[in-house]
Amino acid sequence: MECVTKINENLYYVGGSERKIHLFENMFPVPNGVSYNSYLLVDEKTVLFDTVDWSIGDLFLENIEFVLNGRPLDYLIVNHMELDHSKMVKVILEKYPTTKVVLNQKALAMLNAFVHSDYTSRAIIVNEFDTLKVGEHEFTFVFAPMVHWPEVMMTYDKKDKILFSADAFGSFGSLDGNIFSSDIDIDSEYYSEMRRYYANIVGKFGQAVTNVLNKAKDLEIKMICPLHGAIWNDKIDIILRKYKTWSSYLPEDNTVSIYYASMYGNTENACYALANALAKRNIKNIKMFDVSKTDISYLISDVFRTKTIVIASPTYNGGLYPKMENFLTDLNALNVQNKHVAIIENGTWAITASKLIKKHLEPLKNITLINKELRISSNLCNNQKLIIDEMADEIGKSLEA
Ligand code: FEO
């Protein structure tokens, strides 16, 4: 049976959610599943905005049939060609043989390559700021290259002031009946999953996000329809501000997070001692993460959140503890910037961790090292309390900077 939600007089939600999936992109845990959003407009012409993953393909086709109610599908607008949104493009174009696919040149090349067919004769190629009138509604195409693929574009509906935003403003998590931000408790947990999605999927491309935010700043936006997560029918100024912060790599919270690797608990104990000293200095909302136990996507999301970070690791086989190395490599891959960083290293012989941590930090922009390091030789000693206190003082100053 269909499962459609009416968004307004002419626009319908025809996507869906799934919870069977464990790992989005076979990499990121999605304990609350994920939604694949698609939208169908019924005007003088009928217009479908993007498709969905195969996993909900049957429901998607049923939804479209229900809304079309016997009418042909005139246009399929493809804003993004990543496969979680484009797997059903070929199915749609085969099922509806008169449908024109509206996309840019890069997206057409991807489509033809992905499906090993040539859909050029079915395509309407659009350039940036081209318009398409489908009755009362007229669309403008705003290109958003590298948010987070090169072909990405957004479609703006001038009549209803709706921005179909591709992956931008999306989130992990299924939509459980309520699909509008106004009907969901968009609490810290939702924003936290939204940040985890942003940081890991789009985080590398902050400049591209800034560019498209600048392009969109003159548009009056009453609603944002992303390809994942809730439809934003309120709080638009809040999420635009969040995107501005994240894309500028600025912290959301003026606090400290400690990311540690610990083989036998001794590095962990040193981190607790530091966290305790920070708390005594009235620093709130300190977080500690064991890099061996926490999926890296949560670590990265928290790094985007926090102003000052502490990296603590033992030396391992003369190098860095592998889980820590993986985390630091991802900081580079995702272009993390603007952090104050404190370092704790541990080792019994040939300690190299601090040197190697700094090597990983070198390429990152605007990293300020805390001018006090802790080196422990297996166990934190009582006489190192002074160093912990000095580190905590310096970290406290970093939050005032
Ligand atoms: Fe949701 Fe970039 O795909």
Image (cartoon, grey):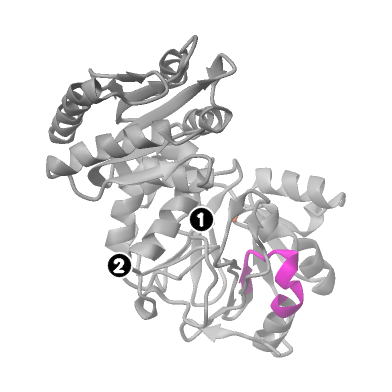
Q: Is the C-beta separation of discs 2 and 1 under 8 Å?
A: no
Q: Name the residue rendered at 53%, 28% in the picture.
A: 329
In the image, residue 171 lies in the stretch drawn in magenta: no
Q: Name the residue rendered at 36%, 20% in the picture.
A: 376
In the displayed structure, 154 sits above or below 6; it is above
In the displayed structure, 91 sits above or below 314; it is below
Magenta residues (range): 47-60
Q: Which mark is residue 235?
A: 2
Q: From this viewpoint, is residue 249 visible?
A: no
Measuring from the top left, give residue 293's x and y in whole percent: 52, 46
Q: Name the residue rendered at 53%, 40% in the picture.
A: 292
Q: Nearer the viewer, mark 2 or mark 1?
A: 2
Q: Is residue 138 left or right of residue 70?
A: left
In the displayed structure, 72 sits above or below 166; it is below
Specify few, some or many for label 2: CA neighbours under 10 Å numbering under 14, 14-19, or 20 or more. some
Tell me the distance, in whole angstroms, between the alpha carbons under discs 2 and 1.
19 Å
Q: Which of 225 and 157 is in front in this view?
A: 225
Q: Which mark is residue 101?
A: none
Q: Residue 400 appears in which quarter of the rendering?
A: top left
Q: Which of 300 and 180 is in front in this view?
A: 300
Mark 2 lies within 8 Å of ligand 1 (Cβ measured) = no
Q: Which of 150 and 341 is in front in this view?
A: 341
Of the two numbered discs 2 and 1 on the same chain, state the one appearing first in sequence: 1
Q: Is residue 137 left or right of residue 104?
A: left
Measuring from the top left, give residue 36's x and y in whole percent: 61, 66
SS class of the residue under badge 2?
A: loop
